[in-house]
Amino acid sequence: MTVPNLTLNDGVEMPALGFGVFLVPDVDAEGAVLQALEKGYRHIDTAAAYENEAGVGRAIARSGIAREDIFVTTKLWIQDAGETHALDAFERSRVRLGVEQVDLLLIHQPFGDYYGTWRAMEDLYRRGQVRAIGVSNFYPDRLVDLIDHNEIVPAVNQIETHPFFQRSADQAVMRSRGVQLESWGPLGQGREDLFTNPILTEIAQTHEKTVAQVVLRWLLQREIAVIPKTVNPARMAENLDVFDFVIADDEMARIATLDTGASTAFNHHDPSSASMLGTTRFDT
Ligand code: NDP
């Protein structure tokens, strides 16, 4: 199974489909990532806040796969924002992952002193300790402001994107600025109403595929990177098997009607949510 690459704005090639490990406890992460690598995944998405970087690192080490053949993303949490804190936090992540270089480093959330964090990440990029730098959960206004007042344009913005929250206008802004959209929660974080949706189910039946495969394929056809998470080996294979069919234009148009324009997970504009996230601490 060959996963195509997307070329980021700094020339780095990133597999368009990767494996997410949010909510996978560290003790399980090693086994899950090893299985994913065996199935053919070559792009792993973790974060300091997931507290499973060490497990991901053990899997990479044990896999026997050459380091340069695995694309590893991690993210800096809010409590580590600011120039000095971010450099220290990156070093802890790098050591936990057991790698010399991280492929993609993201600001996890647009809260706290993320301008200071970005300057630290620009330094890490110039020193070659990361191959690409980007952000996550940035709405277009914050993204454009960060771009206009710094030197390096984020390579990626990882944001919630799925059939119920499609982000087309946000994607247009990112395209105009050379920022790759990467979907988190591509499967709606396992929401039942996604897997039983009549439109998605009908399209899946037409192609003899599952709803999960249709959704991942739909995102990929929109040139959006995807990082579905599963701890189930059969689903790992299922989520990777999306390169042998094409969703037709009329089917793409039908899926477009499912957009609600709103998050199904988290409202970044709600002050109490911003405060809640900003004060949540992890063992980073
Ligand atoms: P996903 O949309 O990937 O959904 C994961 C859920 O779907 C799990 O409950 C999983 O269950 C289930 N699932 C996976 N594959 C299938 C399938 N083929 N059929 C039926 N159910 C399936 O949600 P995530 O929130 O995990 O998002 C993906 C990744 O994005 C994360 O793991 C993380 O790396 C990243 N992320 C980033 C965020 C950010 O703020 N930057 C926020 C959230 C996620 P099971 O494991 O039991 O199979």
Image: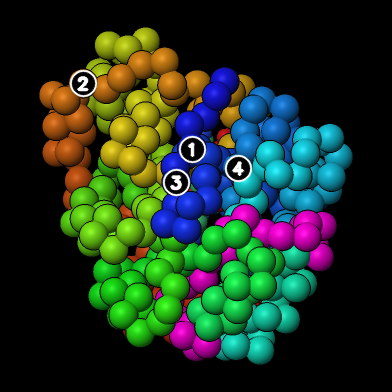
Magenta part of the chain: 95-116
Q: Nearer the viewer, residue 141 or 35?
A: 141
State the CA–CA distance, disc 3 to disc 2. Answer: 24 Å
Find numbered disc 4 in the image and state the secondary structure of the residue it sits on: strand
Q: Is residue 47 visible?
A: no
Q: Residue at x 29, y 39 (%)?
A: 222
Please state which of the two labelled residues, at mark 4 or mark 1, is closer to the viewer. Answer: 1
Above or below for 222 versus 73: above
Q: CA distance from mark 4 to mark 1?
A: 10 Å
Q: Which residue is mark 2?
A: 248
The reply to whether callout 4 and callout 1 are in contact (CB within 8 Å) is: no
Residue at (52, 71) in percent of width and height: 107
How many other residues sit within 10 Å of disc 3, few (<14), some (14-19) or many (≥20)? some
Mark 4 to mark 2 CA distance (whole Å): 27 Å
> Relative to 148, is 53 above or below?
above
The C terminus sits in image quarter? bottom right
Q: Residue 246, image x and y in percent?
A: 31, 19
User: Nearer the observer, disc 4 or disc 3?
Assistant: 3
Q: Which residue is mark 4?
A: 43
Q: Is mark 3 within 8 Å of ligand 1?
A: no
